[in-house]
Amino acid sequence: MRKNVREDNPLAVIKFKNTFGVPLESGPLCLFEDDICVGESMLPRVKVNEEIYAAYAVDLKTTVTMTDSSEHAGQCDWERGRLFLRRWRVYEFVYVVDNKNDHPIDHFYLEHPKKATELIETAEPDERLDHFYRFKLVVPAGQVVKFVVKEQEAVQEEYQLASVTVEQADQWFAEGYITAAVKKTLDQIVSLNEKAKELQRGLSKAQGQVASLKEDVTRIKSCLDSLALGKSSLHAEQSKFRDFFTKGLNETRVGLVAAKKEQKSLEGKRDRNATRINTIASGVRFSKKLGGASV
């Protein structure tokens, strides 16, 4: 029986293999048992040696019911400065086959459509097809057989806690992935990350200032070199320009020294802040199972 074909009564089928040596075109197939027609099936085109299941009747003395449920679960681990968030959803399908016939069903095929990526805690299917599993069951006469299919959909995520954002910390706490104590630690990391951004902005500005002053020094020195090589009868004017550029060069060099000092100071603050972030993120060990929620 395929779950989404007939919800109550299974279809009686035959396992048909084309051993005629030539392809069979689609068409009707009549089935007889002791010279009595028990049903008719419409075969598709069947290739040589291809095996198919052909339905020919409905077994009204056998009923199949199915109930399903799902449960969310997960695991949250914080180690080596990283958060490993493993979440999964388990789907459970309970099939109940009630055979009211006075004979057993030795070959009952249950076709279960795939719901998730992994089959768990379930008997190995007789066949694994693209879109469903086919299980072979034996149902004794006048008895009820229960068969359970479980599937699991798992997702794993990894985050570097040294770069956690306030939105992530708030979301993890709201969804119960982390405790209040861990949330407090994450808030501290978030605050330090904001400080890191501020320091980086200041450092970028200082680096730009150093680069600009270096260009100024090069430009002024070029002007002085040109004056030294130039020949002019206006010695007084030339001397005045030389004094002007020399003064500018000295002032620029003083500014460059100050800018480099500021750059070095900011680099030290940035590195110390980064070390503190990594120390906090790497120094915590935390593990929590996320409770299941039935749906």
Image (cartoon, grey):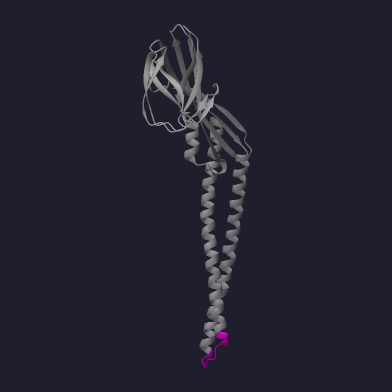
Nearer-the-camera pick, 83 or 242: 83
Q: Quadrant of the N terminus?
A: top left
User: Eyeballing the image, is 138 above or below 209?
Assistant: above
Left or right of 114: which side holds 189?
A: right
Nearer-the-camera pick, 294 or 152: 152
Left or right of 278: which side holds 137?
A: left
Is residue 294 in view from this perspective?
no
Residue pictured at 60% horizontal, 66% vertical:
257
Is residue 197 in view from this perspective?
yes
Residue pictured at 61% horizontal, 44% vertical:
276
User: Eyeballing the image, is 269 above or below 6?
Assistant: below
Residue pictured at 58% horizontal, 39% vertical:
82
Picture coordinates of residue 72 (x, y %)?
49, 26
Q: Which residues are magenta?
A: 227-235
Q: Quadrant of residue 45?
A: top left
Left or right of 58: which side holds 288?
A: right
Is 292 covered by the magenta stretch? no
Q: Quadrant of the C terminus?
A: top left
User: Eyeballing the image, is 254 above or below 37?
Assistant: below
Picture coordinates of residue 75 (x, y %)?
56, 29
Nearer-the-camera pick, 70 or 5: 5
